[in-house]
Image (cartoon, helix red, strand yellow):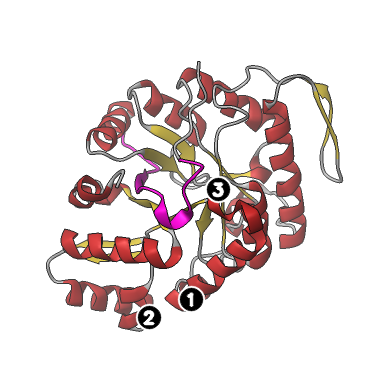
Amino acid sequence: MQSVTPYDQDMTPHQRPFRFGVQASRSTDGKGWTELARRVEATGYDVLTMPDHFDDQLAPVPALTAAAAVTTALRVGALVWDNDYKHPLVLAKELATMDVLSEGRVEIGLGAGWMIADYEQAGMPYDSAKVRIDRFVEGLAIIKGLMHDGPFSFSGEHYTITNHDGRPKPVQKPHPPVLIGGGGKRVLSIAAREADIVGINATMSAGVIGPDAFSSMTAEAVDEKVAITKTAAGDRWSDIELNVRAFLVSVTDDADQAAENIATMLGVEKSMVEHSPFALVGPPSKIVDDLLARREKWGFSYIIVGSADVDAFAPVVAQLAGR
């Protein structure tokens, strides 16, 4: 089988064609989940992603494997797998198996973990950000190393791998594309050096979604995050695809009122909603224009919306996908 990559390595971030994804997490039953996967693919989206938490959601590895099994081109991946929840050798084997079974349609989203409730409910220590990120960096190196041909060894502060030839090897070589999302300088810098896809995120250092996260979703904050990424990437900048998960989506003819409603709900200024790349508000024609402008300004070409937005957002996908 040939290596499969979803991006053209010769294009700069500002010139990359648009890709669209859907973030979903639950279903009432198996039939509903597989029907969602088929609908996401049929509507023109490129990727189905899932969070990785311990709350009311399907487990991502089996759910995404099922989604890939009932589709033919849809790519799948977590947004993102928490490095702390599984030993990286175990996760590497699962990801490689998924890539084989899907014939090369996996994307590896990986993070250091941020949601404090997961750790508390599981009785896992919520270590400092430094320790969690250090562990994540080692985990990423192990996952990449185990997917290469031949035996792999690693000796770090947190993990040790001894002469392990992980199999199966993934279809995509040297490994499926890696997505790392970050909101702070250290993780964004790591992503810039190590990832194929960099997700620009809100800052989640508080461990919960709240005012601190909202304040880091402004256009000005995104300017800074993208600048950090570009500086850290250096010569790799043109190899990176930039991603944003749009959490605030309202496809409506009354963009003004929708922005006002979202601002009131979040306790922020309306102008923040209107200019934040995390918000997509208005009729399809306006959202298309906004996405084109944001790609030109920041380089965002890989856009993910929620499962509730699949149908309403489809006209935007139809106009921009691959363009």
Residues at discs 1 and 2 in contact (Cβ within 8 Å): yes
Q: Confirm whether the magenta stretch covers residue 11.
A: yes
Give the amino acid type for the residue marked by disc 1 in the picture. Pro
Q: Position of residue 123 (x, y in %)?
A: 68, 49
Q: Quadrant of residue 257?
A: bottom left
Residue at the image point whose x is 51% and y is 42% from the top: 9
Q: Which residue is identified by label 2? A: 267
Residue range highlighted in magenta: 8-28
What whole-number distance in Å separates the C-alpha atoms at marks 1 and 3? 33 Å
Of the residues tagged 1 and 3, which is closer to the observer? Answer: 3
In the picture, measured across the screen, residue 162 lies left or right of residue 20, that is right
Q: Confirm whether the magenta stretch covers residue 130.
A: no
Secondary structure at badge 2 equals loop
Q: Circle 2: is it few (<14), some (14-19), or many (20+) Cα within 10 Å?
A: few
Q: Which residue is identified by label 1? A: 211
Residue at the image point whose x is 47% and y is 54% from the top: 13
Secondary structure at badge 3 equals helix
Give the amino acid type for the residue marked by disc 2 in the picture. Gly
Give the amino acid type for the residue marked by disc 3 in the picture. Asp
